Image (tube, helix red, strand yellow):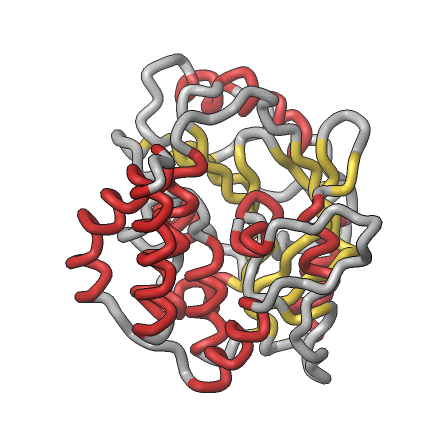
Amino acid sequence: MSGAAPRTTVAVITRNRCASLLRTLDELAALPERPPVVVVDNGSTDATVEAARAHHGGARVVAAGRNTGALGRNLAVRHATTPYVAFSDDDSWWAPGALDTAADLFDAHPRLGLLAARTLVGPDAAEDPLNRVLGDSPLPPAADLPGRPVLGFLACAAVARRRAFLDAGGYHRVLFFGAEETLLAYDLAARGWGVTYEPSVTAHHHPDTGTRPGRTTTQQRNAVLTAWLRRPLTVALRGTGRLAAAAVRGERDAALALSGVLTRLPAALRSRAPLPARVEHAARLLDRPPTTPASDPAPDPQDQYR
């Protein structure tokens, strides 16, 4: 597709990670596709905005002025003018040719709403464990979709049809950030859009090796809030009960997550919209823990909802 109008914009969110962002912009600028890039800065207090605007790649930089979390991706999509949007974080980018491959798949499959890519981690390009989880999805193949149907993906390694993303409402403000992908996958599927894992499309992820404070807490909180937003009350109550039991046992992360659930629950209930029966059936298939040979470590079932 060299010389043709770009079909895919890369959307990047960042906050106070100037050096990492500049590396991502270097990698994106070197792609043969030369995609347009929209960077949403979530209220950085360092030199991120100025450095990104001065970068030779010519990214459009949108300063949100505050930390909008995952909602920054919604803002980036609204600024995109191409039919497809590929998501990167400030520590991830796309392999050469990946965006053209993804765009070809979207062109050929009009119902495809979001494509989860194969993710390679770090300088050794190790397989992200999520690749196996998504590739082993129990959801049956769909004749009008490529890859394997899923209801989960990694936000920094996904490509979406812009129209489908906007139709589904993008990322939900109740969750803000952390394990926010499952709800978007639910909302796309509820509107009839396909969500699939396609390993022929590759993203590279070089995450910071340090631990991120509060990550487990927000993932636990948002998994339960997602249930309150879209799943049957029995599922939501069960998830809340598990958090409460862990909190009683003295697990600090669970206690903080439960507090976060209770704080955000009124807003979640106002936005509650249970899934259609066909999507709830698929979600229940994914609720079941995967069958794994005894010699292999069992993947965390929550990995599919990262």
User: In the image, residue 188 lies at what x, y percent?
Assistant: 47, 70
Q: In which quarter of the image is residue 25?
A: top right
Towards the viewer: 176 or 74:
176
Q: Which residue is drawn at 32% across and 42% down?
A: 247
Residue 84 lies left or right of residue 60; in this view the side is right
The image shows residue 256, relative to residue 78, as above or below, that is: above
User: In the image, residue 134 lies at what x, y percent?
Assistant: 68, 59
Q: Total of numbered circles in the picture?
A: 0
Q: Which residue is drawn at 68% across and 67% down?
A: 137
The image shows residue 239, relative to residue 87, as above or below, that is: below
Residue 187 in view (yes/no): yes
Q: Which residue is drawn at 38% across and 41% down?
A: 218
Residue 88 lies left or right of residue 254; in this view the side is right
User: In the image, residue 154 lies at what x, y percent?
Assistant: 58, 49
User: In the image, residue 220 lies at what x, y percent?
Assistant: 40, 47
The image shows residue 220, relative to residue 170, as above or below, that is: above
Find the residue positioned furthest to the top: 46
The image shows residue 136, relative to residue 172, as above or below, that is: below
Q: In which quarter of the image is the N terminus?
A: bottom right
Q: Residue at x 56, y 40 (%)?
A: 88
Residue 142 lies left or right of residue 76; in this view the side is right
Residue 72 in view (yes/no): no
Towards the viewer: 119 or 279:
279
